Image (cartoon, rainbow, N blue to C red):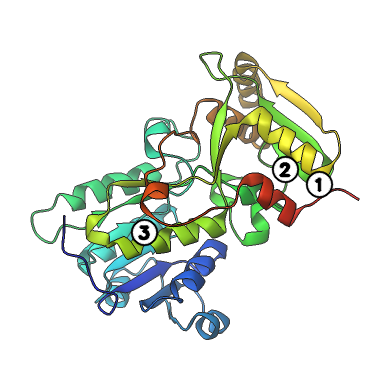
Amino acid sequence: MGKRTTTAMMRIAIAGAGGFASLLARELSQSAYAILVLSTREHQDLEAECDCQVAVVDYANLEGLRFALLGVDLVISTISGSEQLNLIDAARRARVRCFVPSEFEGAIGHRPPAGSDPFDNGSSTALQQLRHWSQSRQHPMKYTVFSCGVFYERFAPGGLQAYNMGTSFRVQDQGDYMIDIGNSLAEIPEANPQGRPVQLVMTSVVDVARFVAAAIELGIDTWPREFKMRGTRLTAQRLQEICSEVRGVNFDVTTRPYEEIIQWLRYYEQNRDEAKWYSMQHLLQTADGRYNFREANLNDEVQVQPLTFRQWLYNVWGPAL
């Protein structure tokens, strides 16, 4: 167990200023931590609301990033791709003690192998870099992944795009992932490869921010390699049923057997229909258990009571008129 860093000493940098980063900044601003937000443009509204500092950075400028991160204890990334890879390199050079990569949806151990993940977007390379630098003899940089399953907000009015999220996973629009609640449509996987019901874990993005803030109170030196959190765990079929019950309307439901999903993927690939190929990939990844896990170790460690999916659905959608 490492020595806990006091709140007075902690300086936290949040990379990105989109929806999730803004929620994190607001949540952490309620503490005594010094909050630095890295963004590619100014955000005076965020500075005023969260009493934080916004540093305008160029993620292609390693030296500029390193300078911005000097004195920072913890970096929380909400960016991906080459920008995150450069951020990791700069954090190491600035001797940041701990790094949280932008890996929130889906447990690490349930993803396809590196090179075969359609939604990788530099994720495997980022984790490889972090593993390497965590084992460095001189100035090792710890890292911890926070896994939450699927964001509830994939099912929100307007989808994740309404929260300035989802582009890297191609699930930004309403209805991009399994269920279009506004139009009462659903396309769900019937079973996993073993023929069992498909299960998934989900959490509200607001609660994810609360979980991360609560984990920081535990002391970053005590963090494990992965924290898992859960708002709800249920089957894909039950997910669709709850949507129908809350809205008070019957949904037009298409249930895809596992082999049929594979066949449609081949068909869309042969016909170069990228949009439908990615849509079917979401069903395959869900059926393969990408978003499913049993143990939620962070729920056991902190006093956060997350919203259930049904509660969240009532709040954002409610019954259909």
> Does residue 41 appear to the left or right of 236 in the view shown?
left
Q: Position of residue 8 (x, y in %)?
A: 28, 80
SS at mark 1?
helix
Check the image and report above or below for 7 versus 165.
below
Q: Nearer the viewer, mark 1 or mark 2?
A: 1
* Residue bearing the label numbered 1: 182
* Residue bearing the label numbered 3: 215
Few, some or many residues within 10 Å of mark 1 (<14, 14–19, 20+): some
Q: Which of marks 1 and 3 is in front?
A: 3
* Residue bearing the label numbered 2: 175
Q: Earlier in the sequence, mark 1 or mark 3?
A: 1
Evaluate whether residue 115 shows in this view: no
Gap in Å between the C-alphas at discs 1 and 2?
Answer: 8 Å
Gap in Å between the C-alphas at discs 1 and 3?
Answer: 35 Å
Q: Earlier in the sequence, mark 1 or mark 2?
A: 2
Residue depicted at x 21% and y 58%: 141
Say which quarter of the image contains residue 283: top right
Few, some or many residues within 10 Å of mark 2 (<14, 14–19, 20+): many
